[in-house]
Image: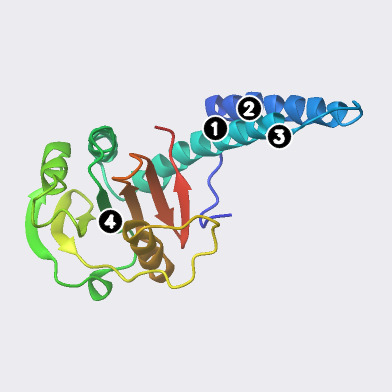
Amino acid sequence: MIGESLPLDQPMKEQVLRSLHEIIEEAEAMRQSLFEENCCILSRLETLKKYIVRVQTMAASFYLHSYLSAYTPHYVDLSLAAKHLAERRHGALIIIERNDSVDHLLHHGIPIGAKVSHTLLETIFYPGNPLHDGGTLIRYDEIVSAGNILPLAQHVTSGKKLGTRHRAAIGLTEQSDALVIVVSEETGTISFAINGQLYALRS
Protein backbone atom coordinates (compact mmCIF):
# COMPACT_ATOMS: atom_id res chain seq x y z
CA MET A 1 0.00 0.00 0.00
CA ILE A 2 1.18 3.52 -0.77
CA GLY A 3 -0.91 5.81 1.36
CA GLU A 4 -4.50 6.55 0.39
CA SER A 5 -6.73 3.63 -0.50
CA LEU A 6 -8.04 4.41 -3.98
CA PRO A 7 -10.18 1.90 -5.91
CA LEU A 8 -9.49 1.18 -9.56
CA ASP A 9 -12.25 2.22 -11.96
CA GLN A 10 -13.90 -0.46 -14.13
CA PRO A 11 -11.86 0.05 -17.36
CA MET A 12 -8.60 -0.03 -15.39
CA LYS A 13 -9.77 -3.11 -13.47
CA GLU A 14 -10.40 -4.89 -16.77
CA GLN A 15 -6.93 -3.95 -18.09
CA VAL A 16 -5.28 -5.13 -14.86
CA LEU A 17 -7.28 -8.39 -14.94
CA ARG A 18 -6.17 -9.05 -18.53
CA SER A 19 -2.54 -8.42 -17.56
CA LEU A 20 -2.82 -10.66 -14.50
CA HIS A 21 -4.25 -13.42 -16.71
CA GLU A 22 -1.17 -13.13 -18.96
CA ILE A 23 1.08 -13.33 -15.90
CA ILE A 24 -0.72 -16.44 -14.63
CA GLU A 25 -0.50 -18.13 -18.05
CA GLU A 26 3.22 -17.36 -18.37
CA ALA A 27 3.92 -18.56 -14.82
CA GLU A 28 2.04 -21.81 -15.52
CA ALA A 29 3.94 -22.33 -18.79
CA MET A 30 7.18 -21.79 -16.90
CA ARG A 31 6.12 -24.29 -14.21
CA GLN A 32 5.31 -26.89 -16.88
CA SER A 33 8.66 -26.33 -18.61
CA LEU A 34 10.47 -27.32 -15.41
CA PHE A 35 9.40 -30.93 -16.09
CA GLU A 36 11.29 -30.91 -19.40
CA GLU A 37 14.72 -32.51 -19.32
CA ASN A 38 16.70 -29.64 -20.85
CA CYS A 39 14.71 -26.64 -19.74
CA CYS A 40 16.02 -23.11 -19.26
CA ILE A 41 13.55 -20.68 -17.75
CA LEU A 42 15.64 -17.51 -18.11
CA SER A 43 13.80 -16.20 -21.18
CA ARG A 44 10.42 -16.99 -19.58
CA LEU A 45 11.48 -15.13 -16.44
CA GLU A 46 12.28 -12.10 -18.62
CA THR A 47 8.85 -12.32 -20.25
CA LEU A 48 7.18 -12.63 -16.85
CA LYS A 49 9.11 -9.61 -15.61
CA LYS A 50 7.90 -7.56 -18.61
CA TYR A 51 4.27 -8.49 -17.89
CA ILE A 52 4.64 -7.51 -14.23
CA VAL A 53 6.34 -4.20 -15.06
CA ARG A 54 3.59 -3.44 -17.59
CA VAL A 55 0.75 -3.94 -15.11
CA GLN A 56 2.62 -1.96 -12.44
CA THR A 57 3.23 1.03 -14.72
CA MET A 58 -0.35 0.91 -16.00
CA ALA A 59 -1.69 1.07 -12.45
CA ALA A 60 0.85 3.77 -11.50
CA SER A 61 -0.45 6.04 -14.27
CA PHE A 62 -4.00 5.62 -12.98
CA TYR A 63 -3.03 6.28 -9.37
CA LEU A 64 -0.93 9.35 -10.24
CA HIS A 65 -3.98 11.01 -11.77
CA SER A 66 -6.09 10.01 -8.76
CA TYR A 67 -3.57 11.33 -6.23
CA LEU A 68 -3.27 14.69 -8.03
CA SER A 69 -6.85 15.41 -9.05
CA ALA A 70 -7.87 16.94 -5.71
CA TYR A 71 -4.75 19.10 -5.44
CA THR A 72 -4.26 20.66 -8.88
CA PRO A 73 -6.48 21.18 -11.93
CA HIS A 74 -3.41 20.95 -14.19
CA TYR A 75 -2.88 17.20 -14.48
CA VAL A 76 -2.85 17.43 -18.30
CA ASP A 77 -0.15 20.15 -18.24
CA LEU A 78 1.96 18.10 -15.84
CA SER A 79 1.58 14.98 -17.99
CA LEU A 80 2.43 16.84 -21.19
CA ALA A 81 5.47 18.51 -19.63
CA ALA A 82 6.76 15.18 -18.29
CA LYS A 83 6.15 13.46 -21.65
CA HIS A 84 7.93 16.18 -23.67
CA LEU A 85 10.83 16.39 -21.22
CA ALA A 86 11.22 12.60 -21.27
CA GLU A 87 11.24 12.52 -25.07
CA ARG A 88 14.09 15.05 -25.09
CA ARG A 89 15.93 13.44 -22.14
CA HIS A 90 15.66 16.66 -20.12
CA GLY A 91 15.76 15.79 -16.41
CA ALA A 92 13.03 17.24 -14.19
CA LEU A 93 11.83 17.28 -10.60
CA ILE A 94 8.27 18.59 -10.13
CA ILE A 95 6.86 18.86 -6.61
CA ILE A 96 3.09 19.00 -6.13
CA GLU A 97 2.21 20.19 -2.65
CA ARG A 98 -0.84 18.51 -1.16
CA ASN A 99 -2.01 18.90 2.46
CA ASP A 100 1.39 19.36 4.14
CA SER A 101 3.33 22.58 3.59
CA VAL A 102 6.79 21.78 2.21
CA ASP A 103 8.23 25.30 2.59
CA HIS A 104 10.42 24.29 5.54
CA LEU A 105 11.84 21.33 3.60
CA LEU A 106 12.93 23.24 0.48
CA HIS A 107 15.98 25.52 0.26
CA HIS A 108 17.36 28.22 -2.01
CA GLY A 109 14.44 28.25 -4.45
CA ILE A 110 13.79 31.22 -6.75
CA PRO A 111 10.21 32.61 -6.63
CA ILE A 112 8.27 32.20 -9.89
CA GLY A 113 4.62 33.05 -9.08
CA ALA A 114 3.16 32.02 -12.45
CA LYS A 115 0.21 29.90 -13.54
CA VAL A 116 1.02 26.27 -14.30
CA SER A 117 1.60 25.52 -17.97
CA HIS A 118 3.49 22.72 -19.67
CA THR A 119 5.48 25.19 -21.79
CA LEU A 120 6.75 27.08 -18.73
CA LEU A 121 7.68 23.82 -16.98
CA GLU A 122 9.54 22.64 -20.08
CA THR A 123 11.39 25.98 -20.22
CA ILE A 124 12.40 25.76 -16.55
CA PHE A 125 13.94 22.32 -17.09
CA TYR A 126 15.67 23.15 -20.37
CA PRO A 127 19.36 22.20 -20.00
CA GLY A 128 21.48 25.25 -19.28
CA ASN A 129 18.66 27.11 -17.55
CA PRO A 130 20.00 28.05 -14.07
CA LEU A 131 16.89 26.52 -12.47
CA HIS A 132 16.84 23.19 -14.30
CA ASP A 133 18.77 21.19 -11.70
CA GLY A 134 16.51 21.90 -8.73
CA GLY A 135 12.91 21.05 -7.93
CA THR A 136 9.96 23.16 -9.08
CA LEU A 137 7.16 23.61 -6.54
CA ILE A 138 3.52 23.62 -7.63
CA ARG A 139 0.78 24.69 -5.24
CA TYR A 140 -2.67 24.05 -6.77
CA ASP A 141 -2.56 26.11 -10.00
CA GLU A 142 0.64 28.09 -9.41
CA ILE A 143 4.32 27.45 -10.04
CA VAL A 144 5.52 28.88 -6.73
CA SER A 145 9.29 28.50 -7.09
CA ALA A 146 12.02 26.69 -8.99
CA GLY A 147 15.60 25.61 -8.36
CA ASN A 148 14.69 24.24 -4.92
CA ILE A 149 17.05 21.90 -3.06
CA LEU A 150 15.22 18.93 -1.51
CA PRO A 151 16.23 16.63 1.35
CA LEU A 152 17.77 13.41 0.04
CA ALA A 153 16.64 9.94 1.04
CA GLN A 154 19.31 8.39 3.22
CA HIS A 155 18.38 4.73 2.92
CA VAL A 156 16.97 3.58 -0.42
CA THR A 157 15.83 -0.04 -0.24
CA SER A 158 15.33 -0.67 -3.98
CA GLY A 159 17.99 -2.75 -5.68
CA LYS A 160 18.76 -0.02 -8.20
CA LYS A 161 21.30 2.74 -7.75
CA LEU A 162 19.28 5.96 -7.88
CA GLY A 163 20.44 9.38 -9.00
CA THR A 164 20.13 12.60 -7.03
CA ARG A 165 16.74 13.57 -8.48
CA HIS A 166 15.16 10.26 -7.53
CA ARG A 167 16.71 10.31 -4.05
CA ALA A 168 15.45 13.87 -3.59
CA ALA A 169 11.93 12.85 -4.65
CA ILE A 170 11.93 9.98 -2.16
CA GLY A 171 13.49 12.14 0.57
CA LEU A 172 10.84 14.87 0.33
CA THR A 173 7.97 12.38 0.27
CA GLU A 174 9.36 10.62 3.34
CA GLN A 175 8.85 13.86 5.27
CA SER A 176 5.59 15.15 3.75
CA ASP A 177 2.54 14.03 1.77
CA ALA A 178 3.80 15.84 -1.35
CA LEU A 179 3.88 14.01 -4.65
CA VAL A 180 7.01 14.42 -6.80
CA ILE A 181 7.25 13.67 -10.53
CA VAL A 182 10.74 12.78 -11.76
CA VAL A 183 12.04 12.63 -15.32
CA SER A 184 15.37 10.88 -15.77
CA GLU A 185 17.77 12.54 -18.18
CA GLU A 186 19.76 9.29 -18.43
CA THR A 187 16.91 7.00 -19.48
CA GLY A 188 14.00 9.31 -20.32
CA THR A 189 11.76 7.40 -17.92
CA ILE A 190 9.07 9.11 -15.85
CA SER A 191 8.45 8.14 -12.22
CA PHE A 192 6.60 9.57 -9.27
CA ALA A 193 7.33 9.41 -5.56
CA ILE A 194 4.76 9.36 -2.77
CA ASN A 195 5.14 8.30 0.88
CA GLY A 196 8.82 7.52 0.37
CA GLN A 197 8.23 5.08 -2.50
CA LEU A 198 9.08 5.48 -6.19
CA TYR A 199 6.84 4.17 -8.99
CA ALA A 200 7.59 4.05 -12.72
CA LEU A 201 4.99 5.35 -15.16
CA ARG A 202 3.94 3.98 -18.51
CA SER A 203 5.92 5.94 -21.14
Callout 1 touching callout 2 (CB < 8 Å):
yes
Residue denoted by label 4: 95
Secondary structure under badge 2?
A: helix
Of the two numbered discs 1 and 4 in the rendering, the one whose residue sits closer to the viewer: 1
Q: Is residue 45 visible?
A: yes
How far apart, in angstroms, are the residues tagged by discs 3 and 1? 19 Å
Secondary structure under badge 4?
A: strand
Please state which amino acid type lies under the numbered disc 2: Ser
Callout 3 touching callout 1 (CB < 8 Å):
no
- How many numbered marks are there? 4
Residue at position x 55%, y 51% from top?
A: 5
Residue denoted by label 1: 54
How far apart, in angstroms, are the residues tagged by discs 2 and 3? 20 Å
Of the two numbered discs 4 and 3 in the rendering, the one whose residue sits closer to the viewer: 3
How far apart, in angstroms, are the residues tagged by discs 4 and 3? 39 Å
Q: Earlier in the sequence, mark 4 or mark 2?
A: 2
Please state which amino acid type lies under the numbered disc 4: Ile
Quarter of the image with the N terminus in it: bottom right
- Quarter of image, res 203: top left
Q: Which mark is residue 19?
A: 2
CA neighbours of label 3 inside 10 A, class few (<14), some (14 to 19), many (20+) = few
Of the two numbered discs 1 and 2 in the rendering, the one whose residue sits closer to the viewer: 1
Please state which amino acid type lies under the numbered disc 3: Leu
Q: Earlier in the sequence, mark 1 or mark 4?
A: 1
Secondary structure under badge 1?
A: helix
- Tell whether 105 sits left or right of 50: left
Residue denoted by label 3: 42
Q: Earlier in the sequence, mark 3 or mark 1?
A: 3
Of the two numbered discs 2 and 3 in the rendering, the one whose residue sits closer to the viewer: 3
Q: Earlier in the sequence, mark 1 or mark 2?
A: 2
Callout 4 touching callout 3 (CB < 8 Å):
no
Residue at position x 9%, y 64% from top?
A: 110
